[in-house]
Amino acid sequence: MKLNRLERSLWLPSPLEEVFAFFADARNLERLTPPWLGFTILNPTPVAMEEGVRIDYRIRLHGIPVRWQSRIAVWDPPHRFVDRQTRGPYRAWIHEHRFLADGDRTLVLDRVDYRVPGGELVRRFLVEPDLRRIFAYRHRRLVDHFGSATGPPAPAGFAFREGITDAS
């Protein structure tokens, strides 16, 4: 079964280490998640981020409470990390975060490969619009925190490593 993909990029006017440190603090997930999702981390914080760590969340999708657990599948500071859903609303969810330095600026790249229950209509009319709104909110919050920067377009295909997006 095919995975769907969402890719986003954003330039921030801060050095790589500072931007990565922000993302490495799991508490900032609440700052980057729209309030309408009712996102709460259930783990004691701070969470020591490293490969293999599992993080439990509670969210509300269209008013329905959902438990979500993700595992940090790849931890490569300060360049990238990957979280994979191990329990939650998706049949598959693999979110790769990449960070590319350019002087005192950082390009933040997100690639989410996902599969939803309910098929194409659910994806097209419920999940995809929600994901677009979530990532638009996230980008606004990042700009509020770091400021905005301009830069060249993200590299074609974001130069993501192959093989990380399988759902197995």
Image (cartoon, grey):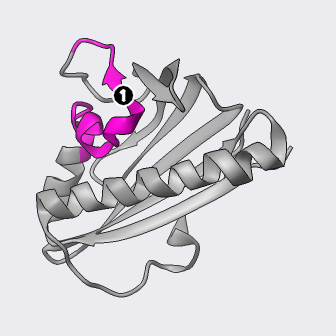
Residue 132 visible, this angle: yes
Q: Position of residue 65 (x, y in %)?
A: 50, 18
The quadrant holding residue 58 is: top left
Query: On screen, 41 above or below 132?
Result: above
Say if residue 97 shows up in the picture. no
- Residue 23 position (above or below residue 65): below
* 53 left or right, relative to 70: left
Q: Could you tell me which residue is drawn at 80 percent across and 48 percent down?
A: 121
Quarter occupied by the N terminus: top right
Q: Amino acid at mark 1?
A: Gly
Q: Between residues 89 and 45, which one lies in front from this camera angle?
A: 89
Up the image or down, 105 lies above or below 151; here it is above
- Judge by depth and name the residue closer to the eye, 104 or 76: 104
Image location (x, y in percent) of residue 74: 46, 39
- Left or right of residue 147: residue 71: right
Q: Residues within 10 Å of mark 1 (few under 14, many from 20)?
A: some
Identify the residue position indicated by label 1 in the image. 38
Residue visible at 19% across and 73% down?
Answer: 148
Q: Residue furthest front?
A: 63
Is residue 59 within the magenta segment? no
Per the rendered image, the range of residues in magenta is: 23-44
Q: Residue at x 53, y 69 (%)?
A: 159
* Position in image of residue 24 (x %, y %): 25, 39
- Residue at the location (68% across, 35% down)? 92
